[in-house]
Amino acid sequence: MKAQYGILRFKKYKGPAISPIEAHNERTKEQYASNPDIDTSRSRYNLHLVQPQGRYRAETDRMITAAHCRVRKDSVRVVEALVTASPEFFKGKSRSEVKAYFEYALKFLESKQSPDTFLSAVVHMDEKTPHLHLCFVPLTSDGRLSAKEIIGNKKKLVKWQDEFWEHMVKRYPDLERGESASQTGREHIPPRLFKEMTQLTQQKEQLDALLTGINPFNGKSRAAEISKLLDSYIPNVSRMKDQLKKYNVAFTQTMTENKKLRQTNKTLSASLDKAKEGSVLKRLEDAKLRKDYEAAVKTLESIPPEVIRFYEDRTQEPVMHHEV
């Protein structure tokens, strides 16, 4: 299963860029030579979650004037939030399911920024991957124009990403963190990885059952069953190894260290702060995944040579065999 990411990005715009952004978002141009991904025959499927009340620039000026906030010539006047997901996430989803995804994402943005500052929220269905453009005037709760305070620095952007994922995963549990995971280090092993490991363990148990009691009398039929199972089991073990490396799951802990970790987890006291507790629990997650993975590899190593030969013969180009 390919990873599916929930995606949230921000862009800031000063005065001169506001009208071109409106033309793109609201599809007021006749041609889009600069963006060949737009299929204008599908533009009728685009939908507004927030309808613009007027032209972007005029509405922006109206809100800024009403707030009586100080504005410089180079002030950021509009922030655009782009919400989407990996293309794989949208495969097989109906238009209403796609709309529900963006409506749920919009609830998150409404919890972080006053909807009164929103200029427009439009879902584009006429490009390769559905996505939402939400444009808002970056007015703070006390009436200042400050994109810097709302969007923040790199650290605050990471927080935006984390909180967005925490919101989205409640309804879409297969979604993973997007860019923030690479910025913060692996804090959370994605639920998908545990699900895949569970499936791999189930395959391991099937393989163990077939290997138990194999003998010269049932060897041929068992070998055929095992060989068929290996078609998916071998690539799944290989893919799991790559995934564990990707999420920095440790492969270096000894049995003694794992035993010590389990004991530590049992005796965690209330005096341990959350950071330490999280670190220990994360290491325990690593240990469990590593143990399951090593069990899967051990099962592979226990397959009799004659069964491996049967598998290799079946998966290679057919050759002529002669009775002796």
Image: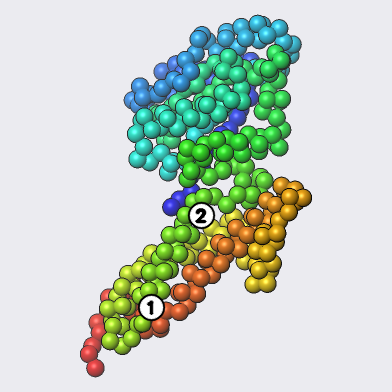
Q: Disc 1 marks which amino acid?
A: Leu
Instruction: Tell how many labels.
Output: 2
The residue where tag 1 is placed is 211
Query: Residue at the left extreme?
Result: 323
Q: Disc 2 marks which amino acid?
A: Leu
Q: Position of residue 200 (x, y in %)?
A: 44, 63
Q: Residue at x 55, y 29 (%)?
A: 108
Q: Residue at x 63, y 34 (%)?
A: 160
The residue where tag 2 is placed is 193
Query: Residue at the bottom extreme?
Result: 324
Q: Nearer the viewer, residue 269 or 158?
A: 269
318 sits left or right of 150 in the view: left
Q: CA separation, marks 1 and 2?
A: 26 Å
Q: Nearer the viewer, residue 48 or 165?
A: 165
Residue 199 shows in the view:
yes
User: Is disc 2 surrounded by few (<14), some (14 to 19) or many (20+) residues within 10 Å?
Assistant: some
Q: Nearer the viewer, residue 261 or 140?
A: 261
Residue 258, compared with residue 119, is above or below; it is: below
Kindly state the secondary structure of the residue where label 1 is placed: helix
Q: Position of residue 292 (x, y in %)?
A: 52, 66
